[in-house]
C-alpha cells in the first residue's frame, strides 16, 4: 500500500520535474536576442532536415488518405444519392481533423524521433558539454534552430497534406467513380469557410507543432546518456507526442467546433 | 551541401506550402459573394426563419446574388430580422420584390429565394438599408401536418 503511494508520488514528482526542465530548456533556447545573421546557416540546415525531408512521407500519406476518404465516403453517400456532398466530406475531414492530426503523428515519427536521437547522442558523446566548455550555449545553438524549424515547418506540411489530400479525393471521386467534377468543387466551396475551417486547422497544427517539437527536444536533451537511454528517449518521444497530440486535438476540437 | 543549395531547397518547400494555402483559400474555401466584393444591405422581417443561418445564400431563380449576414430578434415585435448582403452588381430590385425562405431539395439547406416584383412609376428601387416588406417565412413541417389533420377532421 505504502509502496504504491510512494510510486504514485515519485511518478508525479518526476512528471512535474520533467515539465520544469522542458520549460527551462525552452526558456534558455528562446530567451535573449536572437542572432539570425550569424546563425542563419544553422536554421536553414534544420529547415531542410525537419521540413523538406519530411515532405515525401507527407505527400504520399496525404494523397492516399484523400483517396481512401473519397472511396469510403462515396459508398455511404451513394446510398443516399448524395454523391455531390463528396467534396465537402473530403475537404472538411481533412482540413479540420485529419490534416493537422495525421501530419503531427507522422511528424513525430519522422522528424521528432530523429531530433531526440540526434540530441541524445550529442549528449552521450559529450558534444553538448564540450560546447559549454567553449562558451557556446548549446541551448541557443542546438535547441533554438530545431525548435523554430519544427514549429514553422509543421503547419506548412499540414497545408500541403490538406491540398494533396483534396486533390487525391478528386482523383478517386471524379476521375474514377464519376462524381461530377464541377459539383465536387462547388459543393466544397459552399460548405468550407476560410476562417472557420482553414484558419482553425492551421491554428491546430501550430499547437501540435509546438507540442511535438518541445517533447522531442526535451526528451533528447533529458536522455540518459547511454545507448539504452537514447533508445528509451526516442520511443518516449513518439509515444508521448502522439498521445499529447490526440488529447489536445480533442480539447481544440471541442473549443473550435464543439458549439 | 552548401548553405546556398539548402536555401534554394527550403525556399522551394515554402513556395509549395504557400501554393497549397492558395489552393485551399481560392479553390476549396468559400470565396463567393463576400470579402472584397461590393455589397449593399437589405433587411427583412420574417414570421419564422426555420433553419436559416448566417452565410445562407440568397438566390434569384437559382443564382446566388448574396448571403445572409446577420440574424437578430426584434425586441418589440419578437420577429426575427434578417440582414442580407446583396452583391452590388444586382442593385435594381424593385420594392415590390418578395422574399421566401425555401429549402433546397427535401433534406437540403435552407436559403432565401428573392422574387423580383413588378415595376411602374410609383415603385422605387430597393436601396442600402431598406426593408423588404413582402416576406414569407419558413414552412415548419409540424405545423403543416397539424393543419392537414385539422382540415381532415373538419370535412
Image: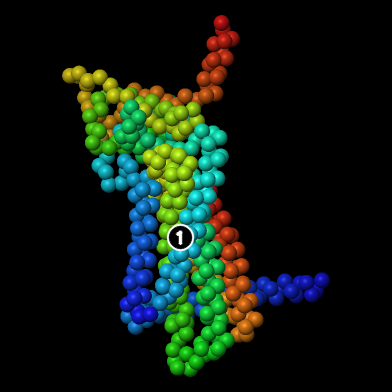
- Direction from residue B125 to residue B114 in the image, left or right: right
Instruction: State the residue lying farthest toward the front.
Output: A176
Q: Callout 1: residue from which chain?
A: A
Taking B19 as reference, is B50 left or right? right
SS assignment at label 1: helix
Query: How many marks on residues?
Result: 1
Q: In the image, what residue occupies the spot 54% across and 67% down?
A: A108
Query: On screen, A141 above or below A243?
Result: below
Q: Furthest-top residue in view?
A: B155
Residue B44 location, x and y as percent?
35, 30
Q: What x and y, as percent, mark residue A243?
A: 60, 63
On the image, numbered disc 1 is attached to which residue? A59
- A27 or A222: nearer the eye? A222
Query: Which quadrant would residue A105 be assigned to in this image?
Result: bottom right
> How far across and how far down the image is residue B112, in percent?
38, 30
- The image quarter in which residue A144 lies: bottom left
Q: Residue furthest bottom?
A: A133
Nearer to us in this view, A201 or A68: A68
Q: Is residue A193 above or below residue A117?
A: above
Amino acid at each position: 500500500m505504502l509502496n504504491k503511494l510512494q510510486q504514485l508520488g515519485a511518478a508525479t514528482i518526476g512528471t512535474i520535474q520533467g515539465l520544469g526542465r522542458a520549460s527551462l530548456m525552452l526558456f534558455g533556447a528562446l530567451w535573449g536576442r536572437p542572432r539570425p545573421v550569424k546563425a542563419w546557416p544553422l536554421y536553414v540546415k534544420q529547415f531542410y532536415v525537419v521540413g523538406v525531408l519530411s515532405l515525401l512521407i507527407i505527400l504520399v500519406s496525404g494523397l492516399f488518405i484523400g483517396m481512401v476518404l473519397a472511396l469510403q465516403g462515396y459508398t455511404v453517400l451513394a446510398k443516399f444519392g448524395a454523391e455531390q456532398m463528396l467534396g465537402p466530406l473530403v475537404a472538411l475531414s481533412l482540413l479540420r481533423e485529419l490534416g493537422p492530426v495525421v501530419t503531427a503523428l507522422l511528424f513525430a515519427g519522422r522528424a521528432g524521433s530523429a531530433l531526440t536521437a540526434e540530441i541524445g547522442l550529442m549528449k552521450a558523446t559529450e558534444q553538448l558539454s564540450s560546447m559549454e566548455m567553449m562558451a557556446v550555449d548549446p541551448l541557443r545553438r542546438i535547441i533554438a534552430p530545431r525548435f523554430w524549424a519544427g514549429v514553422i515547418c509543421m503547419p506548412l506540411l499540414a497545408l500541403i497534406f490538406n491540398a494533396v489530400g483534396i486533390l487525391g479525393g478528386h482523383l478517386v471521386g471524379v476521375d474514377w467513380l464519376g462524381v461530377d467534377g464541377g459539383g465536387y468543387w462547388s459543393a466544397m466551396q459552399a460548405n468550407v469557410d476560410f476562417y472557420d475551417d482553414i484558419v482553425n486547422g492551421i491554428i491546430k497544427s501550430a499547437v501540435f507543432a509546438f507540442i511535438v517539437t518541445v517533447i522531442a527536444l526535451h526528451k533528447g536533451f533529458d536522455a540518459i546518456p547511454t545507448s539504452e537511454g537514447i533508445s528509451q528517449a526516442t520511443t518516449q518521444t513518439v509515444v508521448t507526442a502522439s498521445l499529447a497530440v490526440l488529447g489536445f486535438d480533442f480539447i481544440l476540437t471541442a473549443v473550435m467546433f464543439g458549439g | 551541401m552548401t548553405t546556398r543549395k539548402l536555401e534554394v531547397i527550403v525556399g522551394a518547400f515554402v513556395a509549395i506550402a504557400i501554393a497549397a494555402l492558395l489552393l485551399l483559400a481560392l479553390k476549396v474555401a468559400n470565396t463567393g459573394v463576400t470579402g472584397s466584393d461590393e455589397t449593399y444591405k437589405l433587411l427583412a422581417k420574417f414570421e419564422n426563419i426555420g433553419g436559416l443561418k448566417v452565410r445562407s445564400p440568397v438566390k434569384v431563380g437559382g443564382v446566388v446574388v448574396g448571403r445572409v449576414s446577420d440574424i437578430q430578434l426584434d425586441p418589440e415585435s419578437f420577429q426575427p430580422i434578417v440582414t442580407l448582403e446583396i452583391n452590388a452588381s444586382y442593385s435594381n430590385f424593385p420594392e415590390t420584390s418578395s422574399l421566401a425562405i425555401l429549402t433546397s431539395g427535401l433534406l437540403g439547406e435552407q436559403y432565401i429565394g428573392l422574387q423580383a416584383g413588378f415595376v411602374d412609376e410609383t415603385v422605387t428601387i430597393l436601396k442600402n438599408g431598406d426593408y423588404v416588406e413582402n416576406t414569407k417565412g419558413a414552412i415548419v413541417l409540424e405545423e403543416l401536418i397539424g393543419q392537414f389533420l385539422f382540415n381532415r377532421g373538419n370535412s
